[in-house]
Image (tube, rainbow, N blue to C red):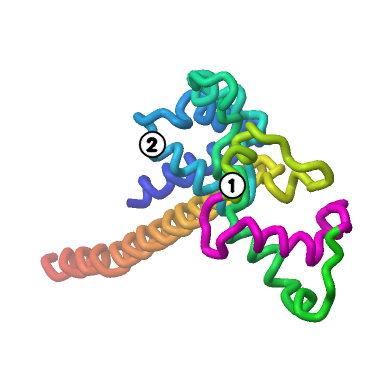
Amino acid sequence: MSLTSGCIGCYCFLTNINLSLENTKNKLLKTLTLKFGDERYKSITDAWNAYQQQYSCCGITSEMDYILTQWFKKQHSFFHRKRRPLSCCPSCEQLFSIHCLKIIPQILTKQPTFSQQFIDDNQLYTEECLTILNICSFNSTYPFSNDMCHGNVPIPPGVPVSFLLHTNGCLNVIHEKDKKIVEKFTIVSWFYSILNAINASLVLFIYQRVFIKHAYSTILLDS
């Protein structure tokens, strides 16, 4: 058990050394490029979709990574090719939670100005929320426009891209989570190694104090 824990600890230590951002990027790029959207690797596709929705990210460094994938290249329709999956866009439920729930009191007390233009993420107020209310269902887990999310319809002028698309890549999030997992596993492995070493030392101590002393006493009695 001690030997096994030690070996696992050494493996985690070496893995942590090799777990550079560039190595993580290369592994993710290979997986995304070759396996995303392939029915044989459905679990990988599901994992990417879940990750992008949970952490509001898209691709490895950006949504442009999907143009390099086999999933994109194998699409037959030229005019309606999906440049990115739906998981790269916030759902109506997410949009409502982020942009409406925080400002509902304003909607009740303030007259919205429909002439106000979308300027940036910090200046999206009641007009933004009313737009979401008009085009979304509160509990919808899909983007309000599939074609816009896939990249077949342009985003309306003045609307921030980040409003309709996860603009950050997933690389940093995945890399940090992998590092934490390896670090925790390394600590646990070394803990068990030390614990087993202490147990072995205790057994050796008892053997020396009890069994050897008993054997010595037996020899004296026999003589």
Q: Secondary structure at mark 2?
A: helix
In the image, residue 57 lies at what x, y percent?
64, 45
Q: Residue at x 50, y 22 (%)?
A: 75
Q: Secondary structure at mark 1?
A: helix
Front residue (pair 87, 223): 87
Label 2: which residue? 42
Q: Is residue 126 magenta?
A: yes
In the image, the segment drawn in magenta is 115-142
Among all residues in the image, which is located at the extreme left? 222
Residue 82 showing in the rendered view: yes
Q: Is residue 166 above or below residue 23?
A: below
For badge 2, the amino acid type reads Lys
For badge 1, the amino acid type reads Lys
Asked which quadrant contains residue 168, the reply is top right
User: From mark 2 to mark 1, how far is it between C-alphas?
Assistant: 25 Å
Q: Residue at x 73, y 40 (%)?
A: 155
Front residue (pair 157, 100): 157
Front residue (pair 197, 152): 152
- The mark lying in front, picked from 2 and 1, is 2
- Of the two numbered discs 2 and 1 on the same chain, state the one appearing first in sequence: 2
Residue 18 showing in the rendered view: no
Label 1: which residue? 179
Label 2 Cα neighbours within 10 Å, binned few <14 / some 14-19 / many ≥20: few
In the image, residue 146 lies at what x, y percent?
57, 42
In the image, residue 178 lies at what x, y percent?
56, 46
Asked which quadrant contains residue 157, the reply is top right
Q: Are marks 2 and 1 in contact (CB under 8 Å)?
A: no
